[in-house]
C-alpha cells in the first residue's frame, strides 16, 4: 500500500480523535480552541508547531499550507504592528479574490481564536469592511458551528 494513503488515513483518524475528544471533554483535552479549529478545518496549525511536533508530517494534507499561512500572518502583522487598519475586502483582493474568501475567513478565525492581533478595533475594521460571512470572526468558539 502506498505510504501517502496510509499517512492520509492517519491524518483523518487523528483529526477525528482530536475533534471528538474536544466535543466530549472541551478544555480538559489540553487542546486549545484555536488548535481544534485548525485541525477540524485542515489549516496548518502554525501557532502550535512547538507543542505538537507531528504536525509537519501531514503537510501535504492541509488545505492551507505552512508557507501560505506564514506569508499571510506576516502581511497582516505589518498592519497590526503599525496600528493601521486593513479591511477584509483588501485582503481578499490581495489573496486571490472571492474564490479565496472561505480560506481567508478560516485563517483569520484561527488567528482570532489564538488571541493574535489583539484589539477590537483591528478585528472590527476587518469585519466592517468585508462580506457578511466574515462577521462571525470574533464569535465565541462553538465546536458545532466552527467545524
Image (spheres, rainbow, N blue to C red):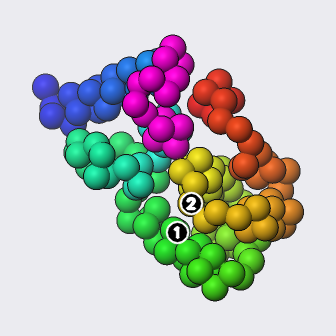
Q: Where is residue 67 in the image (x, y as percent from the top left)?
A: 38, 65
Which secondary structure lies at badge 1?
A: helix
According to the picture, the residue beneath numbered tag 2 turns out to be: 116
Up-down relation of residue 97 to residue 114 (above or below): below
Q: Give the range drawn in magenta.
A: 23-36
- The dot on residue 72 is 1
Q: Position of residue 72 (x, y in %)?
A: 52, 69
Up-down relation of residue 22 to residue 87 (above or below): above
The kind of secondary structure the magenta stretch mainly shows is helix
- In whole angstroms, how far apart are the C-alphas of marks 2 and 1? 13 Å
Residue 89: name its quadrant: bottom right
The quarter of the rendered structure image containing the C terminus is top right
Q: Position of residue 123 (x, y in %)?
A: 74, 62
Q: Is residue 35 magenta?
A: yes
Which secondary structure lies at badge 2?
A: loop
Tell me, yes or no, whether the two marked residues, 2 and 1, touch with CB atoms within 8 Å.
no
Q: Is residue 35 visible?
A: yes
Q: Residue at x 73, y 49 (%)?
A: 138
Amino acid at each position: 500500500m502506498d505510504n501517502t494513503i496510509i499517512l492520509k488515513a492517519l491524518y483523518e483518524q487523528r483529526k477525528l480523535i482530536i475533534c471528538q475528544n474536544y466535543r466530549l471533554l472541551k478544555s480538559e483535552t489540553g487542546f486549545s480552541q484555536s488548535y481544534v479549529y485548525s485541525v477540524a478545518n485542515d489549516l496548518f496549525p502554525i501557532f502550535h508547531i512547538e507543542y505538537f511536533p507531528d504536525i509537519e508530517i501531514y503537510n501535504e494534507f492541509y488545505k492551507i499550507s505552512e508557507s501560505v499561512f506564514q506569508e499571510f500572518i506576516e502581511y497582516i502583522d505589518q498592519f497590526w504592528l503599525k496600528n493601521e487598519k486593513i479591511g477584509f475586502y483588501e485582503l481578499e483582493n490581495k489573496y486571490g479574490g472571492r474564490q479565496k474568501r472561505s480560506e481567508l475567513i478560516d485563517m483569520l478565525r484561527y488567528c482570532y481564536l489564538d488571541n493574535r492581533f489583539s484589539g477590537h478595533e483591528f478585528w472590527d475594521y476587518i469585519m466592517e469592511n468585508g462580506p457578511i460571512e466574515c462577521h462571525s470572526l470574533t464569535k465565541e468558539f462553538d465546536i458545532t458551528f466552527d467545524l
